[in-house]
Image (cartoon, coloured by chain):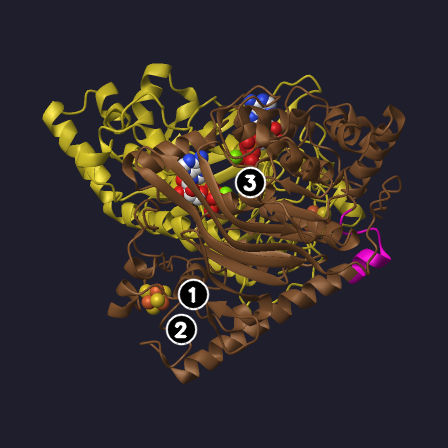
Amino acid sequence: MAGSGTAHLRPPDETLLRVENLVVEFPSKRGKVNAVSNISLDVKSGETLGLVGESGCGKSTTGKAIMQLPPPTSGKVLFKGTDLTSLKSADLRRVRTSIQMIFQDPISSLNPRRRVEDIVAEGLRIWSIGDDASRDRKVDEALETVGLDPSTAKGRRPHQFSGGQCQRISIARSVVTDPNLIICDEPVSALDVSVQAQILNLLEDMKERYQLTLIFIAHDLAVVKNVSDRVAVMYLGKICEIAPPDQLFAQPAHPYTAALLDAIPVPDPTVKPHEQPTLEGDLPSPVAPPSGCRFRTRCPKAQERCAQEEPWVREVASGQFVACHFPLVGDDAPPVDQSTTMQPQAAPASA
Amino acid sequence: MTAPVPTLDQRPEPGGAGCLLEVDDLRTSFRTDRGMVRAVAGVTLNLERGKTLGIVGESGSGKSVLARSIMGIVPNNAEREGSIRFEGTEISGLSQARMREYWGQQMAMVFQDPMTALNPVLKIGRQITESLHEHLEFSKEEANQTALALLKSVGIPEPARRLKEYPHQLSGGMRQRVMIAIALACGPKLLFADEPTTALDVTVQAQILDLLQFQQRERFMGMILVTHDLGVVAGRTDHIGVMYAGRIVETGPTRTLFAHVRHPYTEALLQSIPKIELPSHSRLQSIAGRPPNLVNTPPGCTFAPRCPYAQDRCREEEPPLIEAEQPGHFHRCWFPVGTPANPAYNAEASAEATARGEATFDRIAAAKADAAREDSTASAGFAPAPTAVDGEADADAESSVSAAGAGNVGGIHNRAGDDDAPGGGRPRRRQPLRARRQTSTTDNGERTDGR
Ligand SMILES: Nc1ncnc2c1ncn2[C@@H]1O[C@H](COP(=O)(O)OP(=O)(O)OP(=O)(O)O)[C@@H](O)[C@H]1O
Ligand SMILES: Nc1ncnc2c1ncn2[C@@H]1O[C@H](COP(=O)(O)OP(=O)(O)O)[C@@H](O)[C@H]1O
Ligand code: SF4
Ligand code: SF4
Ligand SMILES: [Mg+2]
Ligand SMILES: [Mg+2]
């Protein structure tokens, strides 16, 4: 399994969210879908964690499993020290005001029959936060900070707004309950470049203003780099690499990260062309993932060992963690005792 | 290796260059409650066979309306003026019925969202053979063989099995390959690709763009590639037209345009792309304000309210299409960037920008050339990786996602007219985007962004 292990996790008391050995499986006619297979992540308060990978690699499933929508097949989701997977639904719903989610398709993720005012106030109403007047004030404030004029916007319905404006409404809705953590699932993928720039800048402003912690899911590396403090690269339900963005992009350690970087069509000459050939083919089926390292069927560096043994997450440079036997940075992985590979908990500590 | 489609004898005779498409002062407006929405406001362009033209601009700038107007797919509330000549024949006055003869065989379109453009209840095979029966009067056997060859040529693994599958059983990238196969089925001379990769992620995007480019060359087609991302067109087009508020505000050979950006809007578009080499948390340069109201476009330059260089003259007089120093390069700006007329002119910085632009182009072109060379030696490129297992499970989830998000851009190839023209053959199964857009544009006149 390409990328199990917890070497990259920081002490639990330093983090707002800690996800341990998360597994999400779905039943299907063709067999079990291994959407997320034993990944671990953590986010410090005030930090933005970027989550990148091809579509279908399990990014949204990870985000939703953190929200317990639906709860994961196994693993722990520790939010402020409480394991959300162990909570009863009433307690869980209370916690959910502190964790919000913003979705990719801005127009269809908003209820078309409701007015913007009601959409934004929804979280406040459900939890009876404040009285009518204070709710109204909060809604106005949220709309104003996302750059919409409350007096004209409140009475309208989502279809009367453009995609970029709908995304602003989603952001207003998500911050109105004063959450700690917002999971943004491809919030700008459906927007054009100039609007994307506005929304990314807006998210940075909102983060500061509302003291937010973000998980930012996207497939565009340049976008993720722009907003993140730490980036996790996912492939077929596994973590490939985790590092601060500047380091990750200057010097990718995982062949998959390097291939992703190659695929970007950036009109800029200062970017060095990479040596690796661009990635071919589609993501293998998560019903029957490749043995050993899941990336091996498309990896230009794959060797015999990659089919046999799953690489563990280990530190190859300061702050840079990678799950690869033959990384582009640092030394090859030392041979692993087979008995320990069977047990994720007993993973060898970082180098 | 991607085999050329054997049963089609529309394969081009490479000597047959010449003007494929000539569009002159094309204007398309929509009658709405609020007045005329001038979506395309005087576009002139031409395209030779074997060449690729990129049309770039923000959402709402009129790119899709332009492409659809050329194809003759306009809704009933539209008024179209100007001339469109296809291989020398004026086609702007033709009826929908006459235009139908052009769709598929002469010109075809690949849409942004393959899921909504494909018919969900028809097997892939049927969707391809249908147009072969209709346009080329192929027998059943011929059509099936051709469909198989087409799927193979667009790099779909196990094509025989795929023919019997439904769209939701394919991954997003695979569906877009099917869309391309359908568009290519009747051997069109002109291919429109309207944001063909916007719904796809980077790696698949690169594959699909490679495939389009390969097919365009192989079949010697003219191609119009519509996108909002200048990065996408940089290495893949011969010419670029930058659109703003229904007009082409800058156009030129791709290399020239990158090296000598003259229009402030083109400059702003380039600057708003997040760049991978900038440190994280760099503030992005977004374009201030919003695109103009297309009902009452203010006098003067339409970009003036958002332009950092705007002067009095800009608000009074509309700039005509002005020829720049380089041949074939035109812009609509009184104070073009990188020239002494611009208030922020700095000779050194301009020279640097030119060098940077040229380097970009060269780098991308070189990378493309390398890739092309590899393709001709190995079976790389457009053929699927031999090890790739298909992703049905993916497709299950994707279809549910698309179902939830239904109502995106699209229309079906060859019958795209059904989308807008009433009485079309296919039942509507999603909220028409145009209708939504219309509301947002006309109800508040401020549809600004998003797609
Ligand atoms: N049927 C219609 N009735 C009224 N207005 C319309 C209609 N179709 C399009 N428009 C308007 O015409 C303008 C150009 O739309 P078009 O779809 O061409 O934009 P685009 O550049 O393709 O944008 P995107 O990048 O979002 O696809 C927009 O303001 C749009 O709202
Ligand atoms: N409800 C579900 N039932 C079955 N398979 C699912 C379901 N949701 C997601 N999957 C599968 O899980 C994998 C990961 O999906 P997803 O998290 O949506 O990917 P991403 O967000 O990275 O594009 C995919 O193979 C997808 O098909
Ligand atoms: S070198 Fe081996 S372990 Fe590393 S990514 Fe490639 S296949 Fe996986
Ligand atoms: S004409 Fe004036 S307002 Fe228009 S783009 Fe040029 S400088 Fe800007
Ligand atoms: Mg997703
Ligand atoms: Mg469009």
Q: Which chain is brown?
A: B
Which chain does yellow denote in the image? A
Q: Quadrant of the C terminus of chain A?
A: bottom right
**Residue type (three-letter) at the residue carrying disc 2:** Val
Q: Name which quarter of the figure residue A160 lies in.
A: top left
> Magenta stretch: residue B49 in it?
no
Q: Determine whether the beta carbon of the residue marked 3 sits less than 8 angstroms from the nearest atom of ligand 1.
A: no
User: Label 1: which residue?
Assistant: B267
Q: Which residue is mark 2?
A: B337
Q: CA distance from mark 3 to mark 1?
A: 25 Å
Task: Tell if the residue under mark 3 belongs to the same chain as the one under mark 1.
Answer: yes
Q: Is residue A80 visible?
A: no
| Residue wearing tag 3 | B199
Amino acid type, mark 3: Ala
Q: Mark 1 belongs to which subunit?
A: B
Say whether marks 1 and 2 touch (CB < 8 Å): yes
Q: Can residue A21 be seen at all in this image of the molecule? A: yes
Respond whether the residues carrying marks 1 and 2 are from the same subunit. yes
**Callout 3 secondary element:** loop
Magenta stretch: give its range: B373-382
Callout 2–callout 3 Cβ contact below 8 Å? no
Q: Describe the element under mark 1 as helix, strand or loop.
A: helix
Could you say which is closer to the camera, residue B262 or residue B360? B262
Is residue B379 one of those drawn in magenta? yes
